[in-house]
Image: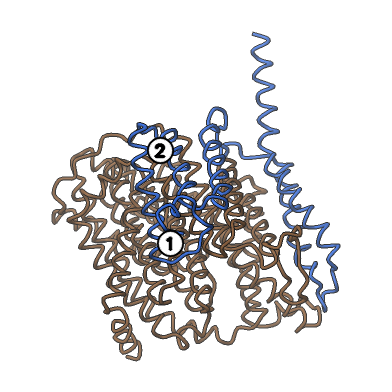
Chain colours: A brown, B blue
Amino acid sequence: MDSLTNLVDGFGVILTPANLLYVLLGVMIGTVIGVLPGLGPTATIALLLPFTYSMEPTSAIVMLAGVYYGSMYGGTITSVLLRIPGEAASAVTAIDGYEMTKAGRAGPALAISAVGSFIGGTVAIIGLILIAPSLAGFAVRFGPPEYVTLTVLGIVMVTYLGTKSTLKSVIAAAIGLLLAVVGTDPIAGTTRFTLGLPGLFSGIDLVAVAMGLFGVSEILYVLERSGQSHGKIGEVGRLTFSREDWKASRGPITRGSLLGFPIGVLPGGGGVLSSIASYGIEKRRSKHPEEFGKGAIEGVAGPETANNASSISAFIPLLTLGLPSNAVLALILGALMAQNITPGPQLITAHPELFWGVIASMLIGNLILLMLNWPMVGFFVQLLRVRIGIIGGIAMLITLVGVYTLNNSTFDMWVMLIMGVLGYFMRKFGFEPAPLVLAFVLGAILEESFRQSMLLSDGSMAIFATRPISAVLSVFVLLFIASSIWGAVRKDKKHSIIDQAKELAGED
Amino acid sequence: MNSEQTAVATHSVKDKIFQRVPYVVGALIGLYFLLGAIDLGVGTLSTPGPGLWPIIVAVILIGCCVVGMVIGGDGEDIEEFAGRLLRPTIGVATLSLFILMFSRFGLVLSGLVLLLIWFRFLARETWFMSAALAVGATVVTYLLFVQLLGARFPDDVIAQLWGGR
């Protein structure tokens, strides 16, 4: 019952005009950028970071969280109506969603995804309330060796679960760890790899890195093909679904909620993986799998529920351990750090208004999204008429100016541009930028904990195997590494659940 | 026939080299950090120096890149470059121009130039439309950052004409 009183207090924090406005603003912006291809939630949150510095910490996080789960709703709209996923997590929805649109059933597809997303989100919030406090209580006992194994496990899982080549993900993560080294050594105080540039003495700024790798590179990437015009926008029709639709979707929505929740907690999990996994499972369970790909409502309901559930549960590792599970959460960590709040096991007790306020805001935000979706779908679709060069130009101007305000120096602008070019080439060569950013964020924690562990153990690596929690985590690390190598040696490309699900989904 | 076959063959050799470019670049980055880290001082495991951690990571990076060079790319992940680099290059060039102009002339003039180029040549709007949108977006950005958020930008040659900063 303790949680319940805390939650009521959380509502007290959120139900102020200012904070309600930030929730509304967050989910609105999230939906809009979810609709617009080429501007994902990561880029948008990076863009918004400078605005949050002058805000209250709770308001800032509430707004950024709203952008994240709001984008999951927005991405659905274009997937269903145009077969263009506004953001990656809605890619599988495009398969059956667009087929439904062609059959004149866009209304039921959008309505069932809105309801599914709402249910998935709510289930995940309840899960968060139940799990987070006890997990944080458990994590208070973690010392440096536990943090080393936990962050290594996180990075290993990000590379393992990534949607592209594991080897390439490991390379990206290693580069991220090396970039994190640049700056002043936290223990010895010497400067490292600064190239004599004063701008690098305090390290490379996370916001500049993230804005470059996600914002700038994404815009450069879509610039390539922006000459293409969108297809005809399908008729939306009435946004309702029949009793048969609901009967077919009930199971997928239930399973999507239960599946999305744990996947969101995993490092590197999040929306993309959970929606693909849900699609795969629904197709396998279905009595009529041949209808998948031809407009099966189950293929819309399940993935949409799952990606929304996972976008909520992804907050658990950050709020309880201080470790972000994906690039979006890494940026939210950056926003908290800028406010002088270091997330970790103490967050819930030290800043209850923040923790419970964010949870209350998620419940309200999901409700707003459910209500917004119905009347505003038509308006959101109109946004697609705006050409990417225009969105891109404005986004670039705001990004450049925003990154300048970090330290009032053009140095960060150049860092961002260089990272943008790097990110562009990474995409072209099949490297994901997410492991780089995540490793970059975790790098400082990892190095410091590693060196402290070595000091504690007098240089013995056994410290990671003798303490019970770090021993268990180490075993997982080794298992994942062994499984990756085994898969590579057997030239078996289908080693992960995503590959199998993708196979089923018939997607590349 | 014969020459056609040769052309196909050279093409694929070129592809194989091309697919390895990122691994070579990665290995060079690793090497740079490795050598730099050795200079910084490794220390011992019980008293780690500033160079120990970067050495561990650099070795992993170099190792992975070497594996990548040997087993080669899974070419299917790599996208076509030919004929597609023009627009991103214009993008990067104008962004660089913006940064250079920004520190000299402030936000408004540099923003106008950036947006005008992007709207006219990358979004292919008409000159009139591009100019109107560029002025609108720049003014909104100026008001948002300077007036609303109180950001301190380099002295603005245009805004000063109206008594701004």
Reading the image, the residue beneath label 2 is: B119
Q: Amino acid type of disc 2?
A: Phe
Q: In the figure, A199 relative to A433: above or below?
A: below
Query: Where in the figure is residue A279, as x and y percent of width and height?
Result: 37, 52
**In-front residue for pair A308/A423:** A423
- Residue under the image location 31 percent in, 87 percent down: A9
Q: Is residue B119 visible?
A: yes
Identify the chain of the residue marked 1, using the numbered disc in the image: B
Q: In the figure, A188 relative to A237: above or below?
A: below
Q: Amino acid type of disc 1?
A: Val
Q: Is residue A160 visible?
A: no
Reading the image, the residue beneath label 1 is: B146
Q: Neighbour class for label 2 at 10 Å: few (<14), some, many (≥20)?
A: many
- Residue under the image location 32 percent in, 74 percent down: A361
- Residue under the image location 44 percent in, 39 percent down: B118
In the displayed structure image, the side of residue A503 where residue A361 appears, left or right? left
